[in-house]
Amino acid sequence: MPRVTLQSIADRVGVSRMTVSNAFSRPDQLSAELRQRILATADELGYHGPDPAARSLATGTSGAIGVLWTQPLRLALSDAVTARFLGAVADELSADALALTMLPPTVPAHDVAMDGAIAYSCDLDAPSVEWLRRRGVPVVGVDMAWEDGVRVTIDDRGGARAAAAHLAGLGHTRVAILAPQAEPDEHPRHLVGAERMAGWIEGLGGIKPVISFVQIFGDNRASITELLRRHRPTAVLCVSDLVAAQALAAAGDLGLRVPGDLSVVGFDDHPVAAGLGLTTVAQDADAKGRAAAQALRQVLANRADPAVPEPADVELPVRLVVRGSTGTVGAAG
């Protein structure tokens, strides 16, 4: 039986070979009716799509986009905000028939075929990030101090400033901050933590907070309980809603009323926030994912044709969402 090719299908349908190729790799170029007719004919002839290896050799592309974390994936993907970001990236790139390749820290980035990459909140000195630099892979950095290409961030500093000013306006003068370990250098690896810390300090004005360092994905409940017991703050600013949820639990362990004895503010507007009545700073993780994918698409287009302009950095807005976890000092809980 002769081998079925794109040309075989084209001859049967009465279209060009390129049209058949587009049905598999660029479906947005065809009407839904024509694409369905081509796919039905291909199925009838026993053809199930171009061989990926052969297409890669012919085009010099892999058809894959790497998504890099330097946190273990089981931690990153357990976070609903991160999962929403990833889903938006996948949806946006699907129109270009691009697949996502997950790059956990245990997989050497030099061993994976990819046309471009999105680095998500990564340590700049991580080996995988360095390998992407050496390979010359186009990279969009998200939520990180990325200076080797386009960067997509949210207004972390402005959101934190609004959250802190909200507490100051409610009369709180004994405020604690729960944040990741600070770094003294001018270009911190953890951009998000540094920007939120700067915003909190600005928003508090002359109020000097107690600062305690936490792990973003860790269990901090014991250390938070100790902080609340020792320093007795009337309000806590948290680097994320998940850390804020631990602060609420610690307050419950100590018999503290929220917000009567303790006001708590999170960050992200994670799905748990509304259920907990948590005041927080909302970011749009879907918009961030779409922006990252669109920026990478434009970077790749510029690589292929320098006449295409390079994309600019993107900073997305955030907003303060006030719920029942904050109130004036001594408010009824």
Image (cartoon, rainbow, N blue to C red):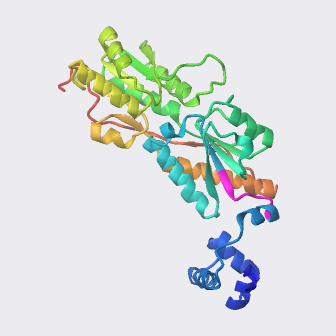
Q: From the viewer's perspective, is residue 105 above or below residue 19?
A: above
Residue plotted at (67% across, 51% down): 296
Residue at image coords 55%, 25%: 194
**Picture coordinates of residue 234, whole percent (x, y):** 30, 17
Judged left or right of residue 247, residue 12 is: right
Question: Residue 284, position in %: x, y?
Answer: 47, 46
Q: Is residue 147 visible?
A: no
Q: State the quadrant of the N terminus.
A: bottom right
Q: Range of the magenta residues?
A: 59-65
* Residue 15 located within the stretch drawn in magenta: no
Q: Which residue is at the front of the view, 33 or 325? A: 33
Q: Residue at the spot x=79%, y=53% of the render?
A: 303
Q: Is residue 299 above or below residue 229?
A: below
Q: Position of residue 307 (x, y in %)?
A: 81, 57
Q: Is residue 63 magenta?
A: yes
Q: Is residue 22 visible?
A: yes
Which part of the image, by quadrant, shows the C terminus? Answer: top left
Q: Residue at x 40, y 23 (%)?
A: 220
